[in-house]
Amino acid sequence: IAGITQAPTSQILAAGRRMTLRCTQDMRHNAMYWYRQDLGLGLRLIHYSNTAGTTGKGEVPDGYSVSRANTDDFPLTLASAVPSQTSVYFCASSDSIGPVHTQYFGPGTRLTVL
Amino acid sequence: GQNIDQPTEMTATEGAIVQINCTYQTSGFNGLFWYQQHAGEAPTFLSYNVLDGLEEKGRFSSFLSRSKGYSYLLLKELQMKDSASYLCAVLDSNYQLIWGAGTKLIIKP
């Protein structure tokens, strides 16, 4: 069981470039999430999707976009990267049908924007 | 606004017991989670509390008091591998997780 996979593992990107971070889960979870984690700030929600075909904005959505064409995939796109988007990005998924909504995380993508 | 507070860093000795506290103020409450995160790795689920009281799972226990907006994670018989950050998170009225900044636990021999 793979769980959640993310690609790439790490990336160095020039400012102004477009970048898509990939996330795939095989647990058939209906909900998926993108977070960024910066030192001292904890996890901050960028975008989420409660089910395939729908997306929503989290706490820090500016500069990012997402799509959810199917249950398994939830890519995050930086249209024009800026240095403040240097961070570790985690994708997560949960089965939000029941009451508990435990989120399971991918291994993360470490992104550096120069 | 929504807020979750936990200590930034704690130090404990191998074999001892440590309690990591978490206080929260959120719009609604649908449960509280504790996650463990080793350096350079993803957070992994430890525990979930939605009713008041203590939930025990091996060496780890988690306590919740909804009236006080308070939880703690208790780690017994500490091992070096328990050195990690511990994240407290609350599921709010919109079923979104609100995260604390995490507590870095350092275990000394």
Image (tube, coloured by chain):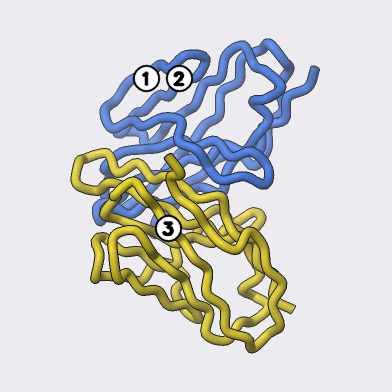
Chain colours: A yellow, B blue
Whether labels 2 and 3 belong to a single chain: the reply is no
Q: Nearer the viewer, residue B20 or A52?
A: A52
Query: In which chain is the residue bearing label 1?
Result: B
Residue B8 placed where, x, y %?
64, 42
Three-letter amino acid code of the residue under disc 3 = Thr
Give yes or no for contact between labels 2 and 1 (Cβ–Cβ under 8 Å): yes
Residue A87 figure quarter = bottom right
Going by the image, does B23 lie left or right of A99?
Answer: right
* The C terminus of chain B lies in quadrant: top right
- Mark 1: which amino acid? Glu
Residue B107 versus residue A14 in the image, above or below:
above
Q: Nearer the viewer, residue B100 or A96?
A: A96
Residue A24 badge: 3
Q: Position of residue A17 (x, y in %)?
A: 63, 86
Percent across and percent down for residue B4 are: 46, 47
Looking at the image, which residue is at 36% across and 32% down? B48
Q: Which class describes the residues within 10 Å of circle 1: few (<14), some (14-19), or many (20+)?
A: some
- Label 3 SS: strand
Mark-to-mark CA distance, 1 and 3 = 32 Å
Q: Chain of mark 3?
A: A
Identify the residue at the far right of this view: B109
In what quadrant of the picture does the N terminus of chain B appear?
bottom left
Q: Provide the secondary structure element on which disc 1 rests.
A: strand
**Residue under pointer 2:** B61
Alpha carbon separation for disc pair 2 and 1: 5 Å
Residue holding disc 1: B55
Q: Chain of mark 2?
A: B
What kind of element bears circle 2?
Answer: strand
Q: Quadrant of residue A45?
A: bottom left
Residue B98 x %, y %: 41, 52
Residue drawn at the location 66% of the way across and 12% of the way down? B16
